[in-house]
Amino acid sequence: MVVEFAITGDELWERMERAVERVNDRLRRTVHVLEAAKVPYAVIGGQAVRAWVAQVDEAALRTTQAVDILVRPDDLPALVKAMCAAGVHHRHSSGLDMFVEHPDASARDAVHVLLVGNGEKGGEPNPD
């Protein structure tokens, strides 16, 4: 079975590059805001793996859409304050705090916050 692409050529390359750059920008902005606000955090999930792989084998580097950060529950108010001051919108949905660029943005295009020692995400325990 052959699948024909509806989008091809330069338009396809540009879409692919924009998608990766949006994730990079989201991660970069989040790290900048948290470091400026002195909110302790850890980048986790696919972006953490991506950073590690970049250290050891750049050719194996892949990206994911998700940006996941881990913070202590006591630091959540400072995180919310700092991110909102930076123009990002806070949303709490299905037990998960997240930050999106505009109120109608998809949860797929968000920074997801996991709290140390609070429950699970995707069936995996949150580390203490």
Image: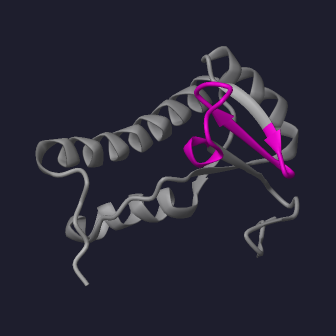
In percent of the image, x 22 and y 66: which residue is there?
A: 4
Q: Is 39 situated above or below 85? A: below
Examine the structure image and report whether residue 79 is included in the region drawn in magenta: no
Q: Which sits in the foreground, 112 or 94?
A: 94
Give the percent coordinates (x, y) of residue 114. 75, 53
Residue at far left of view: 9
Q: Which residues fall within the magenta stretch?
A: 92-110
Give the percent coordinates (x, y) of residue 28. 45, 36
Quarter of the image for residue 2 reads bottom left
Give the percent coordinates (x, y) of residue 39. 69, 33
Task: Count all numbered tags in the image, as a single digit.
Answer: 0
Q: Which sits in the foreground, 99 or 61?
A: 99
In percent of the image, x 51 and y 29: which residue is there?
A: 32
Residue at far bottom of view: 1
In percent of the image, x 59 and y 49: which residue is there?
A: 108
For the N terminus, the image quarter is bottom left
Quarter of the image for residue 109 reads top right
Residue 118 left/right relative to 59: right
Q: Which sits in the foreground, 19 or 127?
A: 19
Examine the structure image and report whether residue 100 is included in the region drawn in magenta: yes
Give the percent coordinates (x, y) of residue 107. 65, 45
Residue 80 left/right relative to 74: left
Quarter of the image for residue 36 reads top right
Q: Which sits in the foreground, 81 or 63?
A: 63
For the C terminus, the image quarter is bottom right
